[in-house]
Image: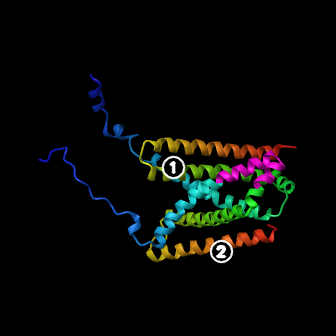
Amino acid sequence: MPSPTTTRPRPLSPNIQIYRPQLTSVLSILNRITGVFLSACAVVLVVWLVAAASGSQAYAAVQGAIGSWIGRIVLFGATFAFFLHFCGGIRHLVWDTVHGFELRSIYISGWTVVAASVVLTVAAWVAGALMGG
Amino acid sequence: MDPQNKQNMRSPLARAIGLGSAKEGVGPWWAERISAVALVPLTLWFAASIIAHTGSDYATFIVWLRTPLAAILMILLLIALFYHTALGLQVVIEDYVHSATKFAAVIAVRLGCCALATAGVVAILRIALSG
């Protein structure tokens, strides 16, 4: 019987970077990354609302920060992150009903999420530009 | 009769009740889905409203936020959003943080989300109920 204090290195599962990225795995991790990023955006949403409640000066300051070129880049990223998380979330809700698990369905829904997110992001910014942004 | 013997006299069912994950264990999972379903119309309404007010000045924006529909939907959005955020971030923390800081991080996320949701709701109420 081996001594209970005997230890040897146990085999570890390989890290994810040795796997070739696939649509399924990339969308899975992007759903999580966009979720964390959107959490930070939710903080900005509250700052924006508190500024709006504080008065026109505070609101103008926050609007100025969002309207700056770096603010617009972040807002564009937030728009895409929102639609990716939104569409990916709907895909997850469909999966929760035990539908769409066939490999073919998974790839169709995956590419639909990517395409819909791009289209919705562009549509949102075109609409915003038409409204005078 | 010593306490140990008293324990053994309980039926297997009596001992099992309350110890498993049945029903209550899926609570946070359900809550994340229900808040997600609520957020589908709420976030779409919010995105559409913000786009519609892209060129608006402060006064126009405030007049819109004072309407009961906008104020109510905005408050519902904040509650569902931060509830969903707290549940989502907790899962992320539980997956990647395995040290003693895990518990502290989860508590910080929950308290932070509560505070942010409250700050947002109070801001909406200040706008909606002023003047």
Q: Closer to the camera, A14 or A116?
A: A14
Per the rendering, the mark at residue A109 is none
What's under tag 2, amino acid-wise?
Val
The subunit carrying tag 1 is: B
Residue A69 in the image, given as x and y percentages of width and height = 72, 64
The subunit carrying tag 2 is: A
Q: Please tell me whether residue B68 is drawn above or below residue A72 in the rendered image.
A: above
Q: Looking at the figure, which quarter contains the C terminus of chain B?
A: top right
Please tell me in which quadrant of the rendered image residue A19 appears. bottom left
Q: Name the residue rendered at 15%, 45% in the picture.
A: A3
Residue linked to disc 2: A119
Q: Which residues are magenta?
A: A42-62
Q: Name the residue rendered at 82%, 43% in the picture.
A: B129
Q: Closer to the camera, A71 or A49?
A: A71
Q: Please tell me whether residue B20 is drawn above or below residue B88 in the rendered image.
A: above
Horizontal side, residue B104 vs residue B131: left or right: left
What's under tag 1, amino acid-wise?
Gln
Q: Residues within 10 Å of mark 1 (few under 14, many from 20)?
A: some
Q: Could you confirm whether marks 1 and 2 are on the same chain?
A: no
Residue B6 in the image, given as x and y percentages of width and height = 29, 27
Residue linked to disc 1: B90
> Does the stretch in magenta take in A69?
no
Distance between the alpha carbons at the discs numbered 1 and 2: 31 Å
Q: Is residue A74 shown to the viewer in this render? A: yes
Residue B25 in the image, given as x and y percentages of width and height = 45, 47
> Does the stretch in magenta take in A58?
yes
Q: Name the residue rendered at 76%, 48% in the picture.
A: A51
Horizontal side, residue A60 vs residue A11: left or right: right
Chief SS of the magenta region: helix
Q: Name the residue rendered at 83%, 49% in the picture.
A: A57
Horizontal side, residue A5 vs residue B86: left or right: left
Mark 2 secondary-structure assignment: helix
